[in-house]
Image: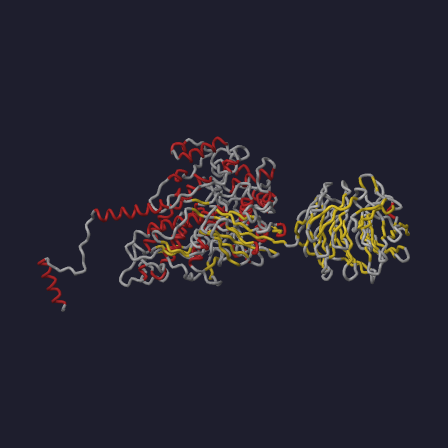
Amino acid sequence: MSSQASEATLQQEEKSGTAEAPQALRPVPHPGPERADDALKVRVDAATFQRGVPLPDHPNNGDEARYVSRFANYSKGLRHDAYGDVLPADYSQLAGSVVSGVPDFFEAVPLGGSRKFVNPQAAQAYQLEGADSHALAIAPAPTFAGLEVSGEMEELYWMALARDVSFQDYTSASAPAVITEALQGLNQLGVYRGPRVDGQVTADTLFRDSLPGSTVGPFVSQFLLQDVPYGAQTVSQRIRTRVPGDDRVSTFAEWLRIQNGQLPSQPETLDPTPRYLRNGRDLAEFVHHDFPLQASLNALLILTVRNDTDTDGKSSPPVHDENNPYRQYQKQDAFATFGNADGQDLLGRVMKLALLGIWFQKWQVHRRQRPEEFAGRVHNTKSGTRTYPIHPELLDSPVLPRVLERNNTLNGGGGGTYLLPMAFPEGSPLHPAYGSGHSTYVGAGVTMLKAFFKTDLPVQNPVVPGADGLSLEPYTGPALTIENELDKLAMNIGVGRLFSGVHWRSDHEHAVRLGELIALRVLQDHARTYNEHFTGFRVRTFGGNTLTVTSIAPVLPNHVSAVTGFSIVDANGLPVPGYESLRNDMTLRTGDLPSGWKLQVNTFPATVGSVRVVCDGITTHDDAAPYTVEATALAGPGVHTLMATPYSGTSGSGLGGVPLGLRLKTDIHWKVTGLLNEGRMNHDMVVLPDGKVLMGPTYNANTTELYDPATGLWSQTGVAKHSRVHYTLTLLDNGKVLLVGGTKGSVYFAETELYDPATGTWTVSGSLAQPRFEHTATLLADGRVLVAGGYADPSSTGSGRLAEVYDPASNAWTSVSAPPWGQAQHTATRLDDGRVLVVGGNWNTPLAALFDPTAGTWAELTPPGDPFINHTATLLQDGRVLVAGLARSWIYSPTGGSWTRAGDPSVSRNGPTATRLPDGRVLLTGGEGSNRLIREAELFDPVTGVWTPTTPMIRARRGHTATLLSNGKVLVAGSDDYNAPVQVCELYTP
């Protein structure tokens, strides 16, 4: 049709008013009850669905009830005494107002200063979308006196000390000492929720969180660095940050002002030059002045311009999620629904809902104190002004002297404190800590972004800030994905509050997941509202799973689950004593654990959908409480690492909760064996020809016992004539055992006894020429026994130079020539050529001599380079002799008659035992150190000449014995626990 004909037709239609509508065109519906009823039904169905989810319990950590003076709970802004403890009546009035929800009650709460509490009535607010704020729960916060709080506080101290260190310098070969020290400190914590690699905190994971993308690539998310397209303009993300070293609240007087809610005494000081985020101080300042929507909105705006071909800002199909129906529509574009406006709306509306959810937790449930408040308790305890039940791990931590030094510098040399150096002059805001508001709303915002965009795409043009923060440089590492950088964005915002000193790690880890859950529940409501064909929002969650969210699926929980700890339980599920609460670097002594033992993963709530455990790289799932790990996963010797994560669904499906890692050492070396019938100390024992072990008498008992390696049990045998200590037992060639010397109080024994294994009886076998104790008795090659040295009177002098020989054939004692010097607490070792090497016996002078049994004579030797007393001497497989005591050791070579310095034991010990193992190594155990008994055990390798620590004994010991059994194990028995004889025995398996 020509243009003229068309015009004529149009004019005719206008005159007649009879233009025909296309057949497919329907009249515009008039508003009416049907549409209104449908709209009501959508709302009612959504509310009914949300109400149908069971309501959770809301337990707190019990500190408020546990400590009536309320020192363990949030009280900032109230009135405090001179030590910083809240006035209990004021606290009760605030808590009562929160519980009642009556608006006027809050106005009657007395304040300590001019600062106001932040919005406690928000805990009572209602909402029209998603789950009600009271319908979701998080785990109780860690307790004031607990190990987790101790570790969290140590981490915050290190973060404060490292605020000005560039994130890029964390992994530098020339990283500042504070980074190295922080890594060492965090790796020694008993409980730590931060990310690790093979059980260790590394420079790449330092101060990050456990979200899947948080440890991938540079510390700062691309969404906090790249320019933001803001309509017709582009906004740089450089910010006004603080000058380096600008830490606050370092004096107790200023801290007390801040706790009372007074304004800071000095204003903030900002760097006049805007910079990109490059260190903890910059990150802290970003989250100091940001608004709830800011970080997530910037990320959304950056994503919407990616590959936006028409640049109209309404829709960005290339980066919309694959479930977005407009990716398939050929003749329609998204805008109000599924377009950028829809995403912006979802992002904005979830911010308030996230805040309502966490404000209920903060004020109504937990009322957890801020780290700066806890630091005041640390300061009072360390300075002795007032004591609180703070875990010793923190009080003994090496970070505290560094903090004291730092605060002294901040105070101009006027004295240090143990307060937490704060990034802001005013410290933390005036609302409780648990959980973090920032973490909640960024967790919700990031979840909305994941639901709206295709997040497995790589980030375009990634950058890192320059060292001075004035410019951006290209990032050249492995590819960064949108979803990982969104996780990292959530980490940055939450961790920024940790760098500020205003929040704990657990405030963030639990709250960011609460924000995720709040957003997912809102998405379920919104999935009901669309007209388009829509299969649901796809979201890669913080637990690593990808969920498709519709109006009724998946079944989302009413809580943020969490792993709260680990235990060892027996076959009946009962905690094994000593293993009720595991901590990092604990030693599992598998030989002591009962048959059927397992590792139990404890969770909040007690029952979740499943727990995923990654143990030494192997993943298992347990779908039924109690959640356990089989013993076989941990039975092998060495270090084992675990990471346990709870999930809302079975087999690790559904929504993930807060994980917890554990690093354990499994010991297959030491095992408790049968108890002695009577405790023993300063005794002796010997292996009999049948493999059993004879235990001699002790100070308060003349009974003797037999140990059977086959059964691991002790049984009574014959009774010796005397109870005694510091004697010797020697196995004779005829199978009998000779008991020589000893003492009991002021009585010193000359009378000797013989034990006959055939009859199990003791008989007197003559007497020494003079009583003695702390002597040596050495079986000679011809079957006789050389007895040398020892003390013989209360002044510890007397028969030190007397030597005698016992002849079993004649049952007679004969004196031989005297040693070159008087000695006691020495050693006597028979060499392969039959001579006897005698070493030590004097605290001040190195001594050594050889006894020739054939000639019956002594010859002095060049001694070792150190004096020895109450030491050990062990004949090595190659005929040399290892002499060890205190923190030194020497080796004597009979072929050259020379001494060589051996490696030094790692522990200085007086009175240890040394046992040669079947493979030639020497096991050194026990003894006494500086004001302590020693548990540590060490191995000496004659081939390398090196001492190596082995697993410590089950208990510390001195005055004990260690004997090699015929099965290659070492039996360690008895101990002098400061005049208390010990029954407990243990076996060492090499």
Residue 123 seen anywhere in this rendered image of the structure: yes
Determine the residue located farthest toward the bottom in the rendered image: 2
708 relative to 751 in the view: left or right: left
Is residue 2 or residue 120 the one in the foreground?
120
Q: Quadrant of the C terminus?
A: bottom right
374 relative to 791 in the view: left or right: left
Residue 421 on image: x %, y %: 53, 44
Is residue 168 or residue 855 the one in the foreground?
855
195 relative to 885 in the view: left or right: left
Residue 834 on image: x %, y %: 84, 59
Residue 346 on image: x %, y %: 35, 51
Q: Which quadrant would residue 382 be assigned to in this image? A: top right
In the rendered image of this protein, does residue 350 appear above or below residue 940? above
Q: How many marks?
A: 0
Residue 589 on image: x %, y %: 62, 51
Q: How is the image coloured?
A: secondary structure
Residue located at (85% from left, 50% from top): 788
Residue 928 seen anywhere in this rendered image of the structure: no
In the rendered image of this protein, does residue 549 appear above or below residue 94? below
Q: Quadrant of the N terminus?
A: bottom left
Residue located at (28% from left, 55% from top): 531
